[in-house]
Image: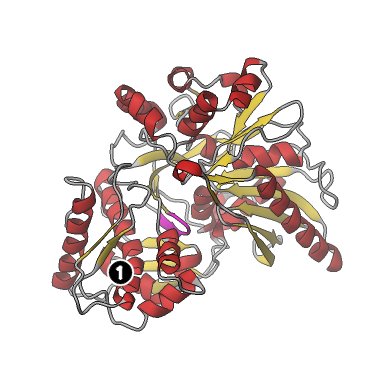
Amino acid sequence: MAAGLILAIDQGTTNTKALLVDCSGAPVFRVATPVPLVSANGGFVEQDPEHLWQSVCRVIADSDAYARQHGWTIDAVAISNQRETALAWDVQSGEAAAPAVSWQCGRGAAICDRNAQFTAEIRARTGLPLAPLISATKWAWLLENDARIRELADTDRLRLGTVDAWLIHRLTQGTVNATDLTNASRTGLLNLTTLDWDRDIAEIFRIPLRALPSLRPSSGAFGCCAAISGVERVPILAAIGDSHAAIFGHGRFSAGTVKATYGTGSSLMALTPALAPDTPSLARAIAWSIGNNVQFALEGNIAMTGSAVQWLGEFLRLPNPAPDVAALAATVPDAAGVYFVPAMVGLGAPHWDASARGAITGLSRAHTAAHLAHAALDSIAFQVADVFFAMEQAAGVPLAELRADGGATRNSALMQFQADILDRPLLRSANEELSALGAAWLAGLALGWWSSLAELESRANPTDRFAPNLAAEERDRLYRGWSQAVRAVCPGKAATV
């Protein structure tokens, strides 16, 4: 059995985290550092690629110091990352050529409108809706609006990638330009049938294929670290999108497994036995890939869940926005008929209305800020339910339970309300860092630490179980009210009971 550790880096939207995972598959050290989001002109949302890189350097240094202090070695690096965020860099200098366009940024809306006639073709081939979320729209915008990006493209110096590719490029000092199939499956450019970049779709967005990274399995070789002291010559043996890593980290690998990751936004993913038929309300994606084996999934993405709570706290000028909203919500038993639809950047699955905007409904003279705070937390559960029910319909079979991970799962009242609205048991993972853990497990498979998924399944984390405990009439009344509120911001697209 191995005597070292796996260093798993989870580069997220607001934090970069790292886990050291031992040969039992359990975390032994955790560190995190914040990364800023920047709101630019026109409502654009960006990040500084150099800040992302420096945050990774910091968590690696802290992890290396811990390992050395305890006499351990780091045998492999694994990467999980925020998805869809689009980066561009100069292959010669290695420098970023533009700010990273956040997955939350809607600047690609006009490009979507212009290419609306290709909506069905894009969804059929890539599994994704034509929406500003996908990386392709962001790269297309950069190519059309940034002279520096066009110059690099014209001279074949431009490289385009998601956050994993950017970090692999920097960690290997530019010797490897690669991404894994899960991240590629969220760009809007990967053909899910051929498992290769789709030339026709790339031409629709006017993106040069030569600028894109090579495609590799999630578990496998991505080069060796060369840029950071302490991990020189350590192999990078896994790369995977954070939501995909999270479902892997739950340790349940059979079709029908459904998980929700509660973060800045939220993602639901359901494993399917094969590539599912095209569906307009959900995305089809690759859950992970190991060697020649590809696990497919259905997915639904929600733009604003945790960030909606943060926004409300800032709007109310609370000192600690998100925690204070949760504390305020706990002072009242429910939202008393108030609904908050956090569509400030549009609505994602299953509604897919980029033009929708946020709304608060049901207000009366008797309501207080506490009721609005409760409605903000409720909106997380309602949005997750919308996607869950759409998944159940697309799968054609009942989904027995929901597995949950992410920071917001610490709120037990929210977890109970989620189980009540779904009328299904909810299983909360005892490990909040499932994205990093899932990536580490994939690297461990590549190292030979574990021989099979069945062996990993025996190492799955314990869970807390929340059983539904709400009368059917009350559940239906609450969900109908939510559906009416959604209908107010995107007519005809709200879910119904």
Q: Residue placed at 45% from the left, 23% from the top?
A: 205
Q: Position of residue 25 (x, y in %)?
A: 65, 61
The local secondary structure at tag 1 comes to: helix
Q: Residue furthest front?
A: 41
Under mark 1, the amino acid is: Ala
Left or right for 114, reference 70: left
Q: Residue placed at 42% from the left, 75% from the top?
A: 326
Is residue 314 shown to the viewer in this render? yes
Q: Position of residue 204 (x, y in %)?
A: 43, 20
Secondary structure predominantly adopted by residues drawn in magenta: strand
Q: Residue placed at 29% from the left, 75% from the top?
A: 371
Q: Position of residue 102 (x, y in %)?
A: 52, 44
Q: Residue placed at 17% from the left, 72% from the top?
A: 474
Name the residue beneath numbered marker 1. Answer: 375
Left or right for 139, reference 482: right
On screen, residue 460 above or below 303: below
Left or right for 109, reference 40: left
Instruction: Give residue 128's quadrant in the image.
Output: top left
Q: Which residues are magenta?
A: 258-265
- Comparing 55 with 179, the one in front is 55
In what quadrant of the picture does the N terminus appear? bottom right
- Comparing 420 with 324, the one in front is 324
In what quadrant of the picture does the C terminus appear? bottom left
- Is 361 inside the magenta-drawn segment? no
Q: Crowding near pointer 1: few (<14 within 10 Å), some, many (20+)? A: many
